[in-house]
Amino acid sequence: MKKFFSVLAVVAVAAVVVSCSSKVNEIGVSKGNKSQLDTLSYSWAINITNDMVSNVPELKFDWAVFADATESSMLKTEAYEEDPVNKEKLQILEEFFTVKRPERIKKFLDENPVDTTSNMPIAMQQQALLGGFDIFESEEERKSVSEAYGYDLGARFRDIRVPIQAYWFAQGIKDFTSENGAAMLSDEASNYINTYFLNVLPRKNQEASEAWLASIEKQKGVEKTESGLLYRIDREGDEVKPSGKDMVKCNYEGKLRDGFVFDSSYERGEPAEFPLSGVIKGWTEGLQLVGQGGQITLWIPAELAYGSYGAGNGMIGPNEALEFKVELLEVVPSAAPEAPAAE
């Protein structure tokens, strides 16, 4: 189903605090304040809706139904994969996009052939033709697919780790597709989104991470290396410590500064094994400070982690400092190079 939702791609796949009150969350989805425009949510909705209108022009959605479904779905608490309602909606979408839509588009284009003598590429001609085609065969089908599509979009946003207000996101969809138009143009919305994710969010994360690390540094037992890595030995291991070239077997839990667990071998039920030369710098340095059988907590600045790019499809944002609790279960020394054969 992924290819059918490419125009709905959203940032981030992570747990989120969801609120059904009027409170605005610093991270995640909240209902939103109707009396105060949230530009981020509004512009993001315009950006996504514009992409849909441009890339799949034959989908003449009932946008009011679409937007209402998106808003209500955003505020639900079920995880995306565990939401029984969304599973039903996905069945509707799968039937429509894998069977009905391809058949109808093929029939329409067969009945409306492109001009083979034109200098315009065939794909562009077909896209233009589809702009005048309404793929839905009844109002009932239009509403059903609109609701399913909107609900699925909202469900995907439940895990977002940026502040999104459901009310203003839905309003952006409605306004952009209304006769009067939205309060901002699509180019303005796109520029706002780019500025937010490339400048505003990285700066906010950096400031918050620096303040967080400064508070951690004051805690009892916390040490700091020359690189800026903070660590605390929670349990001394034996005399065997890994080098930067060794393999290590570990149990670990990784968290963001707000306590969100983004990765855990404990949750997977089995330890991880990897070379210390193939992980982030903070891990490579930090695991060499504890002995086999020991446990260490690492607080890793962004420059020793994932830097200004982040990771995990937005789960770890740009300039995010990280916390890891690591149990070093086993050190597997790197193999010594073989001696050259005697001639």
Image (cartoon, rainbow, N blue to C red):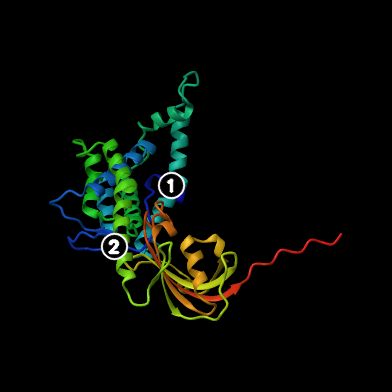
Residue 108 location, quadrant? top left
In the image, taking residue 290 as reference, residue 209 lies left or right, namely left
The image shows residue 303 at horizontal and vertical percentages of 41, 56
| Circle 2 crowding by C-alpha within 10 Å: few under 14, some 14–19, many from 20 | few
Query: In front of the other: label 1 or label 2?
Result: 2
Q: Which sits earlier in the primary sequence, circle 1 or circle 2?
A: 1
Q: Is residue 109 visible?
A: yes
| Circle 1 crowding by C-alpha within 10 Å: few under 14, some 14–19, many from 20 | few
- Three-letter amino acid code of the residue under disc 2: Ala
- Find the residue positioned furthest to the front: 226
Residue at image point 35% right, 40% down: 51
Camera-nearest residue between 254 and 223: 223
Q: Which residue is mark 2?
A: 211
Q: Is residue 77 visible?
A: no
- Three-letter amino acid code of the residue under disc 1: Phe
The image shows residue 249 at horizontal and vertical percentages of 56, 72
Q: Which residue is mark 1?
A: 4
Camera-nearest residue between 88 and 171: 171
Residue at image point 79% right, 61% down: 340
Check disc 2 and report its element: helix, strand or loop.
Answer: helix
